[in-house]
Every structure is written in C-alpha cells, then in structure tokens.
Image: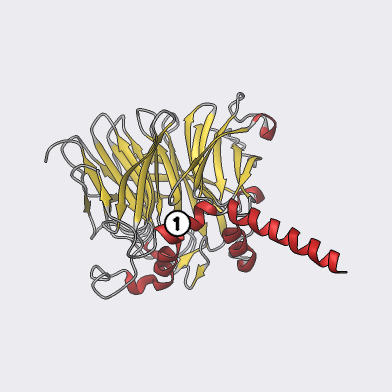
Amino acid sequence: MARIGSAFGVALLALSATFFYSRRDILYTFYANRPGSLKDFNILPNAGVEHEDVVRNCEDVYMNDVEGWAVLSCDPGRDRWNTVMGRFIDSVAPPETGLYLSRYSADDYTEPEKLKLVNFDPGPGNFHPLGLEYEPGSKVLFVVNHAESGTRIESFRLNRERLEAKHIGSITDPLLHTANSIAAMSPSTLLVSNDHYFTQRKNGFLATLETYLGLPLASLVRVELDITRARGPPKVTVLARHAFANGVALLDDTTVAVASSSGAAVHVYTSPSGFAKGTEDVSLAETIRLRFLPDNVSVDGNGVLLIAGHPFAPALEARVIAGEACSAPDATEQGCPTSPSWIAEWTAEGGVKDLFVGNGFGSATTAVRDVRRGKGIAVGLYDRGILTWSEAEE
C-alpha cells in the first residue's frame, strides 16, 4: 500500500510540474505585470486618445490602407453584457452600440460616424458586435454578433458614401457557437476563431475552468459560404484547436496567426492547400511567446504582425466586474479599476518588439497600422475613444 501511495504521489507531482511548466508564460504575467511592477513604455509617435465623447468599448477595427478608412466595432452595452467573460446582467444594447466609420488621411483622423444598418432589426438585445472583417472584392462586412438569442456572424454590404451597411444575412452553425474573430480569404471563405468549447451561457464553471487551465479546446474553423441565390447553410470545418483562440489574421494565403489569450502566445499555422483540406494539411509552424495576454492580431502593409492585449488578467476582470459604474469620463478619478494595455509587433526576422505598454489607454484589443500614410489606430474593450498615432510631425 505504501508503494502505491508513493507511486501516486510521484505521478501527481509529475503532472503538477508538467501543468505549471505549460502555464509558465501566463503565470509569469501575474507576477511581472502586477500593479506597481508594470512600467509604462511607448514608442508610438504622436500617440494620443481621441473621440472619447463619440465611441467607447470598441473591440475590433478593420483598416483599409488603400483608401484611408476604418470601421470600428463598438458596444457600450458590454458593461452589462459580455458573453466571453460571463457578464449577463442586461442584454439591451444602448443606442451608441454599433459600427462606426472613421475616415483618415495623412494629416488627420475624422470623427467616427455611426453606420446605419439597413434591413436589420434584430431587437434591443440582439446586436452586440465583436470581431469584424471586410472583404473588399464583394464589399461585404462580416461582424461577429454575440446576441442574446445566440452567437452568429452577420454579413452587410457596406456603402461608405451613404454611411450605410445593408444586411445580407446571418450565419449560424454549431461549430460557430463561440465565434470571436474573422479573417476573410475570399467572398465565400472565412477563417473564424471560437474562443471556447464550453460557453459561459450554458456552463460558466466549465468555461472558466477551460480558461484558467489553458485547455486546448477552442478552435479555428474554415467557413465556406453559399453565396448563390439559394444561400444554403455554411460548411464549417475544424482546422486546429488550442487554448482560448482569439484574434485571427492572414499573413499570406497559406499562413494564419491565431492569438491564444490564455496561453500568452500567438500560434502561426500553415497549410499548403490554403486551409482547404481540414486538419490533414494544417501544421503549427511557430509559437510566438509573449509577456502579455494577446487579444486581436492584424497585419500591416509590410507584412508585420501587430498584437494587442492585456498585461494583467485580474485587472481586466476587475474592470469587467465594475461594469457601467466605471464608464463615466471621470471614472479613473473616482477610483475605478483600470486595465492596462500592451501593443507589440512581430516579424520572423526580428521577433517581438514592444510598442506601447501601460495605462495611457485601457484594455487594448486591436491595433492596426497604415504604413504608407504613417497612421495607426488601437481600440479598447473597456475604454473611451480610440488610441491614434502618426509618423508625421504634428
């Protein structure tokens, strides 16, 4: 009996050591990035927060660096409704929730203007935009919607001149149950991340366990759409699984970067077929280890991967719990918790380079950059306005 007990103890110790080793990067952030230890850092030129009285709680941004405009996905209702982090107080979205168009030039950023959603009346609790993507060939805007009635992807035809987005349809599937981020390969093919296998809606305990144990259950899927008049159901194929799959960005036609928020890493996958054959020709090419929790990723005109995220998970969770009580412009002065941001870039040749760290802008989720015009935008999950920067002298 003693030998059995000893063997069990050794096995338990080995399993514990393996677990803690696998979680070393995320555990490091709890120590190194704790309040009082995180040092502010910024090399973004002419950086500042703009339009604080126009938009807040923006999760994603698409930038068209050919024509000089961007679309923001913003939801002040996130203070009371966040399906990813398990906040289900009130699903009714305020009037400010929606999609915003921002035109910019080499000289300035214009005030974001809210798009009118045509032929789209989902009801007061059924539009909570998250990740978004634009397919320029078809002028279709794809938006993840964490609606009260269930997660789906909405498709809209964008008309920038009229400030309109005309609803085309809703995309649903059991394999899109926790859709989070989208990368369009063509008008009819999307790569989509599902951030969890277990949902906070149906089983909050297991979803939380999945997050904190870093279980590799979340997925990257390929979605093939029927864009004929028949508009049949989508064909959804699982390509890969890892912990808390979040932002998705194509590096080229055969390479995709996927953030792992609970893994403090970005995984780079390759597929010779362009992700057309399911898991059989998808392989993990590289894991980019980070000192923060990545949220969304984007690729600029030079092929540089931009990564935005959160240095200290407890700070973000505290801000989520604080909710709308901390949404006032003077919330910081009132003692409300702040969630710092971390923005970095990565190239295969140069590795990870930090660009912005600290509380100057809160809870950054996405950073995008127009290399030719020298402009950049970042948005924050729980902050007012947008962080902008400019290479030009101002």
Given residues 19 and 154, the one toward you in this image is: 19
Given residues 392 and 360, the one toward you in this image is: 360
Reply above or below: 59 against 272: below
Given residues 260 and 75, the one toward you in this image is: 260
Reply above or below: 314 against 244: below
Q: Is residue 94 visible?
A: yes
Q: How is the image coloured?
A: secondary structure
Q: Position of residue 172 (x, y in %)?
A: 60, 49
Q: Is residue 120 visible?
A: no
Q: Name, please, the residue furthest toward the left.
A: 394
Q: Amino acid at mark 1?
A: Thr
Residue at which label 1 appears = 29
Per the image, label 1 sits on a secondary structure element best described as: helix
Q: Is residue 138 left or right of residue 267?
A: left
Q: Is residue 308 left or right of residue 14?
A: left
Given residues 65 and 5, the one toward you in this image is: 5
Report crowding for label 1: few under 14, some 14 to 19, many 20 or more residues within 10 A (C-alpha): many
How many marks are shown on the rendered structure?
Answer: 1
Q: Name, please, the residue furthest toward the front.
A: 2
Q: Position of residue 190 (x, y in %)?
A: 54, 37
Q: Position of residue 170 (x, y in %)?
A: 54, 48
Residue in view at x 49 percent, y 61 percent: 126
Q: Is residue 215 left or right of residue 315?
A: right
Q: Position of residue 131 (x, y in %)?
A: 46, 48
Q: Is residue 299 left or right of residue 56?
A: right
Residue in view at x 36 percent, y 43 percent: 344
Q: Quadrant of residue 36?
A: bottom left
Q: What is the quadrant of the N terminus in the image?
A: bottom right
Q: What is the quadrant of the C terminus in the image?
A: top left
Residue in view at x 29 percent, y 75 percent: 335
